[in-house]
Amino acid sequence: MQDIQLLLEQYGGWLVFANVLVEQAGLPVPAYPMLIAAGALGGAAGWLTPWLAATVACLLADSLWYAAGRRYGARLLGVICKMSLSQDSCIRQTQRLYLRIGVRALLVCKFLPGAGALSTVMAGLTGTAYRRFLLYDLVGAMIWAGSALLLGGLFHSVVNDVLEILGTYGAMGLGVLAAVLALYILTRFLRRRILLRSLRVIPRVSVDELMQWRQDGRNTVVFDVRPEAQRDAERIPGAIAVDLKAPLPALDPGALDSDIVVYCACPNEVSAALLASRLRAAGYPKTWALRGGYEAWAEHNHAV
């Protein structure tokens, strides 16, 4: 433990800054444990340096994500969530949180796994004024870093015991932690692969095909499973808003012979395919997921 304490005493601020910056940039390198350790080993008198280092790192990384969100828009959300093991829920949950409470989401987003970068991107994407963004991001970063330091200070004896064990059985302990982490990632990855494979049986329909069906006068019902605030802002004309977690909507008996198209704003049309799968199981065989979701529809209309 003395080596760890000496390392934090000599390079604590820089280590915290680098760790937080890397994590807030989107890499899976948790910074919260290091902040807790800094809070336990440094004492209240030594909290200022890691607190400032973590806050500055957050502001730097978040400002870059904000600028990228303003420039690249919704496409960037999909890119970020490709690093997630739950890409569809990654986008859906972040959009729902930010669109529901606005810039105040920055006060709590760092406590939610994967939501930090996404919320700052959403701030840029939705056109939040930079000064307003910076104020809430500053407060959120200070709360997040301060809470970790406070936890370390309150439970310093427990943290010291853990560091003592790691110092004694360092290689073995790190090996066990790495094995547990690898098993967790593998389990999540396999679950997602199984889910995607099960949803491949849901047929997709393109935007061109959907528009052609409407022009031909085919009876087509369209469902929108995006977050509430997002679908209230804009949607495909005639689309019916549906909550993915709610019971299936009551449909007219004639819908049995209708083409039902479901769309979302998520990778691989997962949310749309999930609802389509439930509808097919309920006796509506002519159910489709819209390939590319709402973004494909918007791009098609913009091109036209």
Image (cartoon, grey):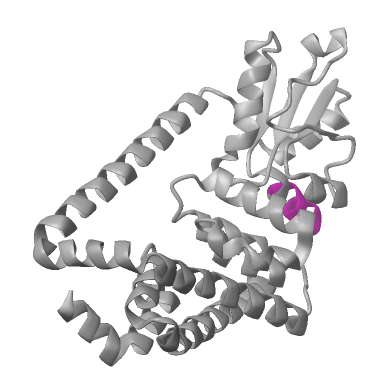
Q: Main secondary structure of the magenta part?
A: helix
Image point (73%, 42%), residue name: 226
- Indicate the position of residue 262 as horizontal and vertical percent values: 71, 31
Residue 300 located within the stretch drawn in magenta: yes
Q: Closest to the observer: 117 or 152? A: 152
Work out which quarter of the rendered image holds the N terminus and state it: bottom left
- Indicate the position of residue 3 as horizontal and vertical percent values: 16, 80
Residue 58 located within the stretch drawn in magenta: no
Rendered position, 147 above or below 260: below
Rendered position, 268 above or below 283: below
Residue 7 in sight from this viewpoint: yes
- Indicate the position of residue 49 as horizontal and vertical percent values: 44, 89
Image point (56%, 66%), residue name: 117
Q: Closest to the observer: 23 or 36? A: 36
Q: Which residues are the magenta region?
A: 296-303
Image point (64%, 47%), residue name: 92
Image point (40%, 29%), residue name: 194
Name the image quarter holding residue 40. Answer: bottom left
Left or right placement of residue 95 versus residue 14 in this view: right
Q: Closest to the observer: 273 or 156? A: 156
Figure disc tally = 0
Residue 204 in sight from this viewpoint: no
Q: Closest to the observer: 79 or 115? A: 115
